[in-house]
């Protein structure tokens, strides 16, 4: 398992060398979905806070960047900074509301909030252009390097994704990450030990919003287009499915899960039109058959096989 | 003056509609501690049933349709509960996720079966004539909707408060383990309540049909309204669902009429206030 992960990391920069444009683009999408799923996993896996509204952060940051660059003539750098700041501020506000509750209440509030944003994106058509979405967007050119070719964009996303993985790995293995896991498992004991469970959760909520915003920027750079569906419950649910299918509370799980969901979506939509129905069926399958996820499941299988061969 | 009265009546009728939607949700949550995210889809299924039945059989009575659709949707809900949800008893998160998966399946199936265009549900003929209220003309059917909600509230109240079944349900809500110990078949109750809740949603979908008409995405429009109503009123409280429905009915109607662009934001302001000052909702109990 560990060797498989290392092999994937070593092979990842080589994708543009060996693969065609279609696969390079697919790989970029997988990486973006992986960052998004990892950020959600901070809440679901490490914080025990199941959010069904994570698409809010991806969508809002993408919308802010799209509006600023296309309509108000901002440069990509300042637009990105504003959209990240704005999204984290929104996460801070949403966190204050949603963290009044835990468990199912938290889930329902995050869902309701994200549905409100989705409704706004549809209805406020003079700002968001409604169902038509915002078209004609451009990609940034960091350090003067154009990202318009699939390969250059892939490398850009790869660098961001590597950094994101590193930062999130540091986050969960830090002392703060330990207190987060403590709050997830034993909130009362943690409170008795002098930790503030609410604050720990709130900071995590904002941090997850931050990486959600980053994946939103990459998302809008990749597609050069934004539509209200990016804020929809389907979008949140796909990410949550990725996290749970891969294995929540692990670092590799959400990456694998997000890749599986994205590849499934791409290949399935080539053959069947009914992606939503398939998404629903996959949900039922994963929850009923593989409740702990692919990565822990396969690790356990590998461990069992290893024992037997010895 | 006319504006306020007409919009006030509109608010009442939307409130009635919301109660038909959210009472089942609240009921299911109260007993099963399950956020049934399929609820909007079950409601939409009822509306589509009505659209098909009432358009193919001219003059079909809407009450008969509502009962028929309610039973049909309750049967689907019961199957889902027996086949899927009971397997996930120890896994509340898994239960929510399968209800979400189920809602995707149902809404996509509706899209396949009924296509992407919206299908109007005819208003019953004997209710088509407008009524004069305080000298203002108002569609009769919308007033009837308020009556339906009140009737439903009374029926549910009597069921929960005055019958043996209701006593067992309340016992199951308060302390499922103890209820099991004294011989109440709690898992059968779960099925009954799930059927009842989804059945109300299906029947509510029929009754809401003439106002809303059946269209893809109806489920995604209704689910957040149900969530907001129950979060506001207190999750699992029938009275809370009733009061919450009418509060949201008023806020949404006047919000849309006065500030059409901001209606969605205005909709969730009361929710924020309630969560900030009374997280369990207006009529919810602590620890619910």
Image: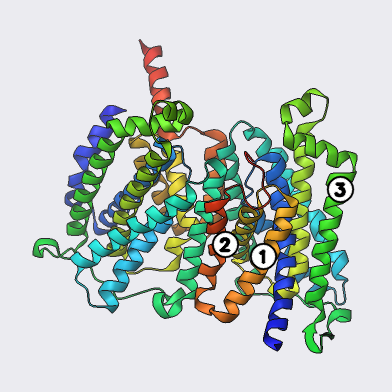
Q: Position of residue B209 (x, y in %)?
A: 73, 70
Q: Position of residue B154 (x, y in %)?
A: 85, 56
Same chain assignment for discs 1 and 2: yes
- Residue B285 lies left or right of residue B65; in this view the side is left
Q: Which residue is mark 3?
A: B159
Picture coordinates of residue B173, whole percent (x, y): 73, 37
Q: Residue at point 25% right, 73% down? A: A69
Give percent across and percent down for residue B143. Answer: 80, 75
Chain letter, disc 1 residue: B
Relative depth, front residue between A34 and B26: B26
* Distance of label 3 from label 1 (alpha carbons): 24 Å
**Above or below — where is B252 with respect to B74?**
below
> As rendered, which of B228 and A251 lies closer to the eye?
B228
Q: N-terminal of the two: label 1 or label 2?
A: 1
Report the residue at 59% width, 37% height from top: B92
- Tell me if residue B200 comes above or below residue A244 in the rendering: below
- Residue labelled with disc 1: B247
Question: Looking at the picture, do discs 3 and 1 lie on one chain?
Answer: yes
Chain ID of residue with mark 2? B
Q: Which residue is mark 2?
A: B270
Residue count near mark 3 (Cα–Cα under 10 Å), binned few <14, some 14–19, many ≥20: some
Q: Earlier in the sequence, mark 2 or mark 3?
A: 3
Tell me which corner region of the image, top left, top right, bottom left or bottom right, holds residue B42: bottom right
Can residue B214 be seen here? The reply is yes
């Amino acid at each position: 398992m560990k060797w498989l992960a290392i092999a994937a990391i070593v092979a990842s920069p080589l994708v543009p060398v060996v693969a065609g444009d279609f696969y390079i683009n697919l790989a970029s999408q997988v990486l973006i979905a992986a960052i998004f799923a990892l950020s959600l996993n901070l809440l679901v896996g490490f914080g025990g806070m199941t959010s069904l509204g994570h698409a809010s952060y991806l969508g809002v940051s993408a919308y802010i960047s799209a509006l600023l660059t296309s309509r108000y003539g901002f440069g990509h750098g300042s637009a990105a900074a504003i959209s990240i700041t704005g999204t984290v501020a929104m996460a801070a506000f949403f966190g204050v509301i949603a963290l009044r509750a835990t468990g199912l209440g938290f889930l329902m509030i995050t869902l309701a909030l994200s549905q409100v944003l989705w409704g706004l994106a549809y209805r406020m058509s003079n700002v968001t252009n409604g169902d038509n979405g915002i078209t004609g967007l451009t990609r940034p050119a960091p350090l003067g390097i154009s990202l318009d070719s699939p390969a250059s964009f892939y490398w850009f996303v790869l660098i961001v994704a590597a950094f994101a993985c590193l930062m999130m790995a540091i986050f969960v293995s830090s002392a703060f990450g330990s207190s987060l896991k403590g709050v997830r498992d034993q909130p009362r004991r943690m409170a008795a030990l002098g930790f503030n469970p609410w604050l720990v959760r709130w900071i995590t909520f904002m941090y997850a919003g931050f990486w959600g915003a980053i994946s939103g920027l990459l998302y809008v750079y990749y597609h050069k287009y934004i539509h209200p569906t990016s804020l929809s419950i389907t979008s949140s649910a796909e990410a949550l499915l990725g996290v749970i299918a891969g294995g929540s509370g692990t670092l590799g799980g959400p990456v694998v899960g997000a890749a599986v969901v994205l590849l499934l979506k791409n290949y399935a939509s080539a053959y069947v039109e009914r992606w939503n129905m398939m998404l629903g069926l996959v949900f039922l399958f994963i929850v009923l058959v593989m409740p702990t996820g692919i990565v822990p499941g396969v690790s356990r299988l590998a461990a069992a096989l290893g024992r037997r061969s010895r | 003056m006319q504006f306020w009265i007409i919009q006030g009546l509109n608010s009442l009728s939307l409130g009635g509609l919301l109660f038909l939607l959210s009472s089942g949700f609240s009921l299911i949550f109260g007993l099963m501690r399950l956020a049934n995210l399929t609820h909007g889809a079950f409601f939409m299924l009822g509306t589509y049933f009505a659209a098909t039945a009432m358009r193919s059989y001219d003059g079909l009575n809407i009450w008969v349709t509502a009962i028929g659709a309610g039973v049909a949707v309750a049967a689907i809900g019961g199957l889902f509960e027996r086949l899927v949800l009971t397997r996930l008893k120890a896994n509340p998160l898994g239960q929510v996720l399968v209800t979400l998966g189920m809602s995707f399946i149902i809404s996509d199936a509706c899209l396949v079966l009924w296509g992407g265009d919206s299908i109007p549900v005819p208003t019953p003929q004997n209710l088509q004539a407008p009524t004069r209220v305080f000298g203002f003309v108002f569609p009769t059917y919308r007033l009837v909707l308020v009556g339906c909600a009140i009737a439903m509230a009374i029926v549910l109240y009597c069921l929960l408060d005055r019958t043996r079944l209701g006593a067992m349900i309340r016992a199951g809500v308060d302390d499922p383990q103890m209820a099991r110990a004294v011989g109440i078949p709690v898992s059968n109750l779960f099925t009954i309540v799930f059927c009842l809740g989804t059945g109300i949603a299906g029947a509510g979908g029929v009754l809401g049909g003439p106002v809303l008409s059946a269209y893809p995405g109806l489920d995604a429009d209704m689910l957040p309204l149900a969530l907001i109503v129950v979060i506001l009123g207190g999750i699992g409280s029938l009275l809370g669902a009733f009061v919450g429905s009418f509060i949201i009915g008023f806020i949404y109607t006047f919000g849309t009429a006065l500030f059409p662009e901001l209606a969605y934001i205005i909709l969730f302001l009361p929710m924020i206030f309630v969560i900030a000052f009374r997280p369990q909702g207006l009529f919810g109990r602590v620890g619910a």
